[in-house]
Amino acid sequence: MSLGKILVPLDGSDQDDVSLVTAIRAAKPFHAHVVAFFAHPDPAEAMPIIGVPLNAEAMSAVIDGNTRIFRAKAKRIHDAMARVGASESARLVDAPYRQNVVTLSYREAIGYPPHLVSSAAALADLVVCAPADKAPQLFETSIDLILQQRRPILLASSPPAAFRKVVIGWDGSAAATRALSAAMPLLEKADIVELICVEQAIGQSFDTEPAIAYLKAHGISPSEVHLGRWDALPHDALTKLAVEHNADLLVIGAFGHSRIRETFFGGVTNETLCRPPLPVFLAH
């Protein structure tokens, strides 16, 4: 299995370098193409709400100001692409096509950013997003990609040197199964794969046999770790163990509970989207 196209939504912030490096390092084993995607509103439509109508001169000034802001962000993205592309040996190209190295191209779209990112992600193998605490505007977009487009996303506050050791959070759910299947290209390239089960109640034990059999069918022989009933929140147990085991990547199923339940009572997905201590691969 392989990755051919990775989408990276960018916004001209300092986090862009991290997202680009993460995407390129995920792409390297496959010589995949990375698309740096900048979605922003139409400068004429991104008008402030001030409670009073604007005259033509004021509207023109606002539009010109918005245009300068978006152009400045686009320039910062281009600068980040040149800087990261050079440091990570990625080749800058005008359009996606397969080569014997990672290639990197730029795409800009004007409209409602969440819809634009969602549409672009529909034909991407993986979407690399900044976590919610680094780029709040991408939080709802990330959720929409998971729930509506069913696209796997990779969140990273800092990139690993390579994705050599991967930890899988397993509970036997449909979401965990989907994440395991979607992450298979990265799992096949990893040197070490661990399957971790965090039991939710005394006496409960998740059946790992189907997951182990599926991994072995792909030539992967994972180790298996069972944690007893958690003393803290499940995301704390999973991420803490992944960090302690020096994992480069944590794979988990997203929104195993309903979105409403996750929103009001908290859950693995919401917490992981907000503050991942290591790169996290999510799918639903």
Image: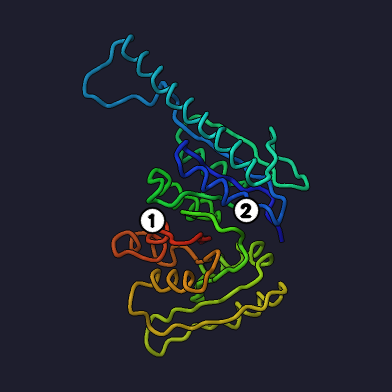
Looking at this view, name the residue that lies furthest to the front. 87
Residue drawn at x 56%, y 52% as measured from the top left: 22
Residue drawn at x 70%, y 35% as measured from the top left: 93
Image-quadrant location for residue 107: top right
In the picture, which quadrant includes the N terminus? bottom right
Mark 1 or mark 2, which has the lower sequence index?
2
Looking at this view, name the residue that lies furthest to the right. 100
Looking at this view, name the residue that lies furthest to the top. 57
Whole-percent x, y for residue 94 in the image: 69, 32
Say which residue label 2 marks. Answer: 25
Could you classify mark 2 by the number of other residues whose Cα lies within 10 Å: few (under 14), some (14-19), or many (20 or more)?
many
Say which residue label 1 marks. Answer: 274
Q: Is residue 191 above or below residue 3?
A: below
Q: Please name the amino acid that badge 1 sits on.
A: Cys
Circle 1 SS class: helix
Say whether residue 233 is visible: yes
